[in-house]
Amino acid sequence: MDVHLENITAYHPAREQDEVFALKNVSFQVKTGEHVAIIGPSGSGKTTLLQIVAAAMKPQSGVLSLGGINPWSISGGALRQLRQHLFYAPQIPPLPPRQRVVTSLSASRLGEMGLSKSILNLIYPQYSQDALNTLSLFDLNEKLWSRVDRLSGGERQRVGLAKILMSRADLWLVDEPLSALDPKRSRQAIQVLIAEAKKRGVTLIVTLHQVDVATKEFARVIGLQAGELAFDLPSADITKNILQDLYAQNEHEITQLETQLFHAE
Ligand SMILES: Nc1ncnc2c1ncn2[C@@H]1O[C@H](COP(=O)(O)OP(=O)(O)OP(=O)(O)O)[C@@H](O)[C@H]1O
């Protein structure tokens, strides 16, 4: 599914008084099957941007088009149908605490199950073989029947990624999927996500704090700064100066950036 944003401006209803917007005049296109990373300092609008693309938040102005359809100009029923084609994975995966991993993974296919199968899924989890195969991509096969609240933070985050792969959506919107993972697991997890997206022709948009992962693993990187598009470049064209400018206002993150770039060399 292709994504097209034209002059999107958005703000949160409960914003601070001094905040005028979370996104301002943001325009870009992502082709079907393309993979894009979005980076930027904390508060630059990365999550808001994903929520806009997921049609979970309505922009104040501008036009969003998903597969040629403006989600805000169609009926509620058509919007629900359109949303079945995309998977939005928030920063903290919403995993009900007492649920087993297998149930949580199969819930990614609730949209195609129908009511009776969905209820049955709570007792006899469906698609358990697919769930096992997916978990094995993240070295989590032995956790298939574990309760979600007995997993470590990093394991929970990888279950969140496995849930994306279990879905049959053709647009994946993934918000900071690596925050609880060590560098080696981060690299491995993002490589699995990209390889699966490629295999299935899925369009992938991922927000990342790990600049080194974004520039090494993604062919295209978009930089956001204070709600505006700072750059939209092939990763090969992104220099240290461009990155330093992006994070210039944020001392803490520029130190992190230097560490990442230093280790990446
Ligand atoms: N639910 C909300 N209510 C009010 N304001 C919000 C809300 N969520 C975000 N904002 C504001 O919108 C702006 C963009 O926030 P957003 O969460 O999109 O940034 P981000 O780049 O994802 O940050 P981070 O990297 O810290 O997750 C910030 O100024 C933030 O304070």
Image (spheres, rainbow, N blue to C red):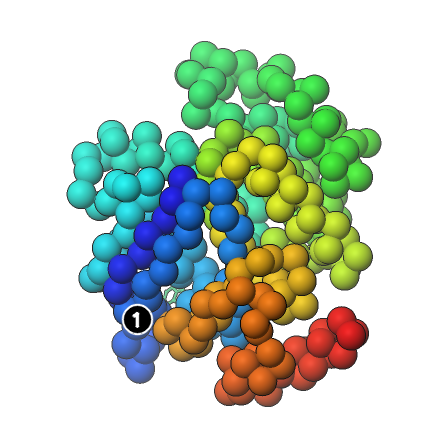
- Residue under the point 61% across and 63% down: 214
| Dot 1 amino acid type | Lys
User: What quarter of the picture does the N terminus occupy?
Assistant: top left
Q: Quadrant of residue 59?
A: bottom left
User: What quarter of the picture does the C terminus occupy?
Assistant: bottom right
Locate residue 128, reporting x and y percent: 67, 20
Q: Is mark 1 within 8 Å of ligand 1?
A: no
**Ligand 1 image position (quadrant):** bottom left
Task: Out of 259 and 128, give the one closest to the viewer.
Answer: 259
For residue 83, above or below residue 254: above
What is the secondary structure assignment of the residue under circle 1? Answer: strand
- Residue under the point 74% across and 37% down: 137
Residue picked out by circle 1: 24
- Residue under the point 49% across and 67% down: 233
How many residues crowd around disc 1 within 10 Å: few (fewer than 14), some, or many (20 or more)?
Answer: many
Q: Is residue 104 left or right of residue 64?
A: right
Can residue 57 be seen in this snapshot? no
Locate residue 91, reporting x and y percent: 55, 54
For residue 90, above or below residue 136: below
Q: Quadrant of residue 2?
A: top left
- Residue under the point 68% across and 43% down: 192
Locate residue 67, reporting x and y percent: 33, 40
Q: Quadrant of residue 216?
A: bottom right
